[in-house]
Image (spheres, rainbow, N blue to C red):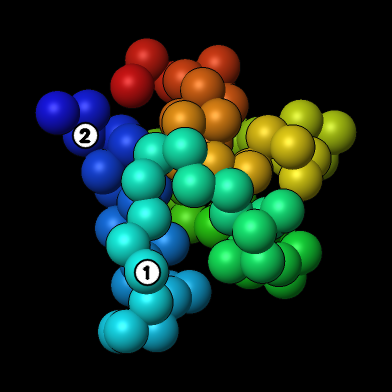
Amino acid sequence: MDELKEVIKNYIINEYLEPDSEPITYDTPLISGGIVDSFSMVSLKRFLENKYNIQIPDEKATPEAFDSVNKIAELVREFTKA
């Protein structure tokens, strides 16, 4: 099990999904699928920066980079040793 991916997935489930929502996977389209919007993306970015004590440059925090748990985990790993 990948702890980073689980942290990201659980945050998204707890913050953005209704209790009766379809389950998400590491590859579920988050932004293009309408689960995460631009405001939510900013709060997710802040959560990750605070949790992992990193700074994700705005130019790297694109909708494409935040469109799945796998892509978000790749982005976080660019700036951490996670």
Q: Residue 37 is drawn in which quadrant?
A: bottom right
Is any atom of residue 43 visible in this view?
no
Secondary structure of the residue carrying numbered label 1: loop
Is any atom of residue 45 visible in this view?
yes
Q: Residue 3 is drawn in which quadrant?
A: top left
Position of residue 4 relative to residue 81, above or below, is below
- To which residue does mark 1 refer? 22
Give residue 58's position: percent from left, percent from top: 80, 40
Give residue 32's position: percent from left, percent from top: 72, 53
Position of residue 68 relative to residue 1, above or below, is below
Position of residue 36 relative to residue 55, above or below, is below
Report the Cα–Cα distance between label 1 and label 2. Answer: 22 Å
42 relative to 44 in the view: left or right: right
- To which residue does mark 2 refer? 3
Of badges 1 and 2, nearer the viewer stands 1
Nearer to us in this view, 36 or 33 = 33
Query: Quick one: which residue is furthest to the left in this view?
Result: 1
Q: Residue 66 is drawn in which quadrant?
A: top right
- Give the mark, 1 or 2, whose residue is nearer the N terminus: 2
Secondary structure of the residue carrying numbered label 2: helix
Query: Quick one: which residue is furthest to the bottom in this view?
Result: 19
Q: Disc 1 residue type?
A: Glu
Which image quadrant: the N terminus? top left
Query: Quick one: which residue is furthest to the right in this view?
Result: 59
Number of marks: 2
Q: Report the residue at 33% width, 22% height from top.
A: 82
Q: Disc 2 residue type?
A: Glu
The answer to whether mark 1 and mark 2 are in CB contact below 8 A is no
Q: Report the residue at 48% width, 56% height from top.
A: 47
Q: How many C-alpha atoms fall within 10 Å of the one at disc 2: few (<14), some, or many (≥20)?
A: few
Give residue 27's position: percent from left, percent from top: 47, 38
Position of residue 13 relative to residue 31, above or below, is below
